[in-house]
Image: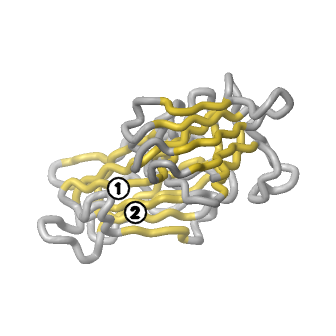
């Protein structure tokens, strides 16, 4: 969902006037770009201790997203709120994955809609940081390369969404040499979808890449002439990390279920 985005801040002498509200009235938004590595980013400033800046963002159910708040002098926090701004869905202050003084969230919504990211500062800043300063908030969908943060555990179903023709979702998994795996992607029969609102990925594709994400080891489009879902029988050639690559054939978009 698009919002009208005014200037982030106005400097006048030594005074900084905050123009980003801390509630659902905000006009600031993040819109994740198309393609296999879609992301959105914006900058702001925590002007006084306790300041919170809210950004609206439209999320697709089943997609796994990563949100990060990187501080410039400030020890940032990040929280995620529902569409009404009344329920906090997640919160992070210091994340080892995002840098100890940065904030990182991973979230998969159960419904399409507008959510709100709230950028703030820790009330107890880490050494070398403060409760005020600049920040950069970034939103990612599942990357379409080896930088992915999404993992695929054995015997698990993973819901997802391909939301444009260039979108690819990568999931990492570890295997020992000689281990046999069966992977599949289906576009129907996923119990996480609400009846009557299923927009299936009509023609899913599935690939398996090596640990560097540079060599395609296996690929399937249609299971057979009568089944447009994807299925791969795979025996790992070495001990290490591999990547599952889910996409849509042609311009196919919609919801899928990855079976591992």
Q: Residues within 10 Å of mark 1 (few under 14, many from 20)?
A: many
Q: Where's residue 60, x and y in %?
A: 64, 48
Q: Is residue 211 visible?
A: yes
- Distance of label 2 from label 1 (alpha carbons): 6 Å
User: Is residue 99 positioned above or below 250 on the image?
Assistant: below
Which residue is at a point 70% across and 45% down the rendered structure image?
A: 256
User: Is residue 217 positioned above or below 196 on the image?
Assistant: above
Farthest residue to the front: give it: 178
Which residue is at a point 51% across and 33% down the rendered structure image?
A: 217
On the image, numbered disc 2 is attached to which residue? Answer: 78
Give the quadrant of the N terminus.
Answer: top right
Q: Is residue 36 left or right of residue 232?
A: left
Q: Where's residue 94, x and y in %?
A: 31, 68
Q: Residues within 10 Å of mark 2 (few under 14, many from 20)?
A: many
Asked whether the beta carbons under mark 2 and mark 1 sit within 8 Å of each other, the answer is yes
Q: Which mark is residue 69?
A: 1
Q: Secondary structure at mark 2?
A: strand
Farthest residue to the bottom: give it: 124
Q: Where's residue 213, x and y in %?
A: 41, 35
The picture quadrant where one finds residue 51 is bottom left
The residue closer to the viewer here, 71 or 27, is 71
The picture quadrant where one finds residue 81 is bottom right
Which residue is at a point 54% across and 70% down the rendered structure image?
A: 88
Q: Is residue 113 visible?
A: no
């Amino acid at each position: 969902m698009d919002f009208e985005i005014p200037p982030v801040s106005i400097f006048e002498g030594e005074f900084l006037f905050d123009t980003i509200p801390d509630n659902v009235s905000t006009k600031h938004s993040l819109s994740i770009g198309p393609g296999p590595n879609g992301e959105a980013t914006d900058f702001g400033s925590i002007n006084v201790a306790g300041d919170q800046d809210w950004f609206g963002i439209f999320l697709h159910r089943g997609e796994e997203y990563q949100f990060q708040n990187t501080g410039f002098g400030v020890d940032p926090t990040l929280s995620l709120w529902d569409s009404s701004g009344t329920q906090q869905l997640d919160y992070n202050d210091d994340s080892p994955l995002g840098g100890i003084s940065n904030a990182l969230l991973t979230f998969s919504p159960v419904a399409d809609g507008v959510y709100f990211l709230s950028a703030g500062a820790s009330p107890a800043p880490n050494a070398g940081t403060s409760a005020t300063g600049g920040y950069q908030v970034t939103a990612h969908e599942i990357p379409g390369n080896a930088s992915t943060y999404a993992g695929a555990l054995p015997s698990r179903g993973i819901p997802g969404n391909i939301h444009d023709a260039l979108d690819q979702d990568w999931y990492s998994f570890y295997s020992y040499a000689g281990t046999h795996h069966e992977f599949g992607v289906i576009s129907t029969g996923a119990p996480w979808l609400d009846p009557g609102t299923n927009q299936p990925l009509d023609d899913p594709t599935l690939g398996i890449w090596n640990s560097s994400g540079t060599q395609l080891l296996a690929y399937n489009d249609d299971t057979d002439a009568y089944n447009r879902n994807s299925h791969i029988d795979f025996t790992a050639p070495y001990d290490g990390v591999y990547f599952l690559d889910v996409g849509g054939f042609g311009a196919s978009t919609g919801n899928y279920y990855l079976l591992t």
